[in-house]
Image (cartoon, rainbow, N blue to C red):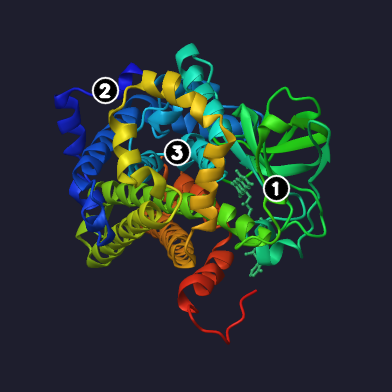
Amino acid sequence: MAKISLTRMEKDRYLAQDPKITDVINSLVSREKLPQSKALNKDIETVVALARKFNEEVVKPAYKQIDLEVSKDNDYLCWDFIKKANEWGLYSLFIAKMFGGNGMNIIGMYPFVEELASVCVGLANVVGVHYLGYATLCSSWNLRVINEICREVKQGEKTGNPCLISLAITEPGAGTDLEETMLMDKGKVETIAQKVEGGYIVNGSKVFISNGHVSTWHMLIAYTDKTKPSKTTVMLAVKNGMKGFSFGHHEKKMGQKACVASELIFEDCFVPDKYIACDANAFPENASKSRQEIVQMLIDYVVSSTRAGVGAFAVGAARGSYETALEYARKKTVNGKLLINHQWAQSLLAEMYKNINIGRAAYMESAYANTMHGLVKTLFFLPIYYADRFLPSWYWTFIASPFFRLKIVTKLFRWVNFYRYPLESAEIQSGWASLTKFGCTDLGVINCQMALQLMGIDGCRHDIGAEKYYRDAKLLQIYEGTNQLNRINLFKNLVSRNMQEVEVF
Ligand SMILES: Cc1cc2nc3c(=O)[nH]c(=O)nc-3n(C[C@H](O)[C@H](O)[C@H](O)COP(=O)(O)OP(=O)(O)OC[C@H]3O[C@@H](n4cnc5c(N)ncnc54)[C@H](O)[C@@H]3O)c2cc1C
């Protein structure tokens, strides 16, 4: 925890590295509309410097070995790394102070994960996907459950027992379908929650859950009626050790090997009422927004914030592969002169440099869209922003926490964030998130391919690192909605706006 603080000299040293911090934060139009720009810049500087220090001291010495370990033994879990990240305070770094976290501005998370991914996308995901769980938890607007789980994350840092959160939505027979309510009812949904006295009984399984085996809490998405999942979605907080919950196999996958992809099994798993984070069935049928619209908002709040994060991972991979290729080209002699002095190599490197900067501008724009239209808008509402920043943590623990337990508080937040949520905001955040997701991940994969091409056989060697970026980056085109789905979602939200005759899905 203590390591979060950097000395002035350390900060200057890390900020002097490429890319310059101004490249990271100064690109954008939307940012100018944020009243908190100055403080935001400072937070971004701090977390970028912190990520660079963490890379040097923890990630770089370990990442190639972890990749090899998992290749040899698919059941290997990188606990040493997770404990280090926990010790450094990375799992509560971006959790709001009001919920016991360190309260760094959430916008900083995007350049932060780019930095980690510029060395290893797999390890960046071991940190980043915890915030996918956090975003899911927050999108329930259930302040009591959010507060309880986030405080456990902080407690886990204090005791040295990491407490991570995963998101479990994908099922053996349904992936893409579950990220869009218009497709959900056609999908093969099998994780069913049945209401019983005092809670829900869940049966079914989830697959490819990142960080599953190493997380303590799992935000489980289940359905009470498998013929109408889009109207009967429930979000449950499932903790390790709950009766009827167990872990299955680890997926054997091509890349991001450090980040385990787990099967979660539910056999008559009992989840008590107090861990129902959000239940679409509890929303009135005849309110101004239908249950299906509420479920879509729930999904959009999550994926709009996390797709920008996947964009940042991809820019990290694009940058890592570019830096590897650049370094190689400065040393390798081809046809009697340095590779970097061949014009075709120069134009390839310029192309890669362009991809990085276009990608970064896109993911930051999407992050800002979230502050103005999405999940984190509430945190940027000035009274909440200043309270979170300046009130001491004892205030949140002892004075505010009891209020978070009141049902009326959750009701108020849901009224503002579901019923008063303008359609236009949903379109902007969701459209930008999709643009960023497929735009950045496609550019990321292209950069990795170009690096391999430039480096010839050396690019294929594990110890040099270029082939690993490629294996890692490819997966980014698949998760958080495949790039096909994201193209359609961009079309739905921004391209076909106000076109009554257009049908999507
Ligand atoms: C490394 C990794 C980590 C992951 N981590 C998580 C996690 O933490 N939690 C979690 O819940 N899930 C996770 N996933 C699952 C991921 O979200 C799904 O893979 C993704 O939603 C796609 O689902 P699918 O693979 O089942 O593809 P499918 O839905 O089977 O799709 C197959 C193909 O059909 C296309 N397709 C499907 N429907 C349409 C349509 N309507 N229009 C056009 N094209 C369509 C898809 O684009 C794809 O090309 C992870 C996946 C990977 C690879």
Q: Secondary structure at mark 3?
A: helix
* Residue type, mark 3 in image: Ala
Q: Secondary structure at mark 1?
A: helix
Which residue corresponds to the image point at 18% horizontal and 49% vertical from the top-left? 22
| Earlier sequence position, callout 2 versus callout 1 | 2
Q: Residues within 10 Å of mark 1 (few under 14, many from 20)?
A: few
Q: CA distance from mark 2 to mark 1?
A: 44 Å
Residue 419 in the image, given as x and y percentages of width and height: 54, 57
Residue 292 in the image, given as x and y percentages of width and height: 67, 61
State which mark lies toward you, 2 or 1: 1
Residue assigned mark 2: 5
Residue assigned mark 3: 124
Residue 282 in the image, given as x and y percentages of width and height: 70, 48
Q: Residues within 10 Å of mark 3 (few under 14, many from 20)?
A: many
Residue 133 visible somewhere in the drawing: no
Q: Residue furthest bottom?
A: 501
Residue assigned mark 1: 282
Residue 482 in the image, given as x and y percentages of width and height: 58, 60
* Residue type, mark 1 in image: Ala
Q: Residues within 10 Å of mark 2 (few under 14, many from 20)?
A: few
| Earlier sequence position, callout 3 versus callout 1 | 3
- What's the mark number on residue 1? none
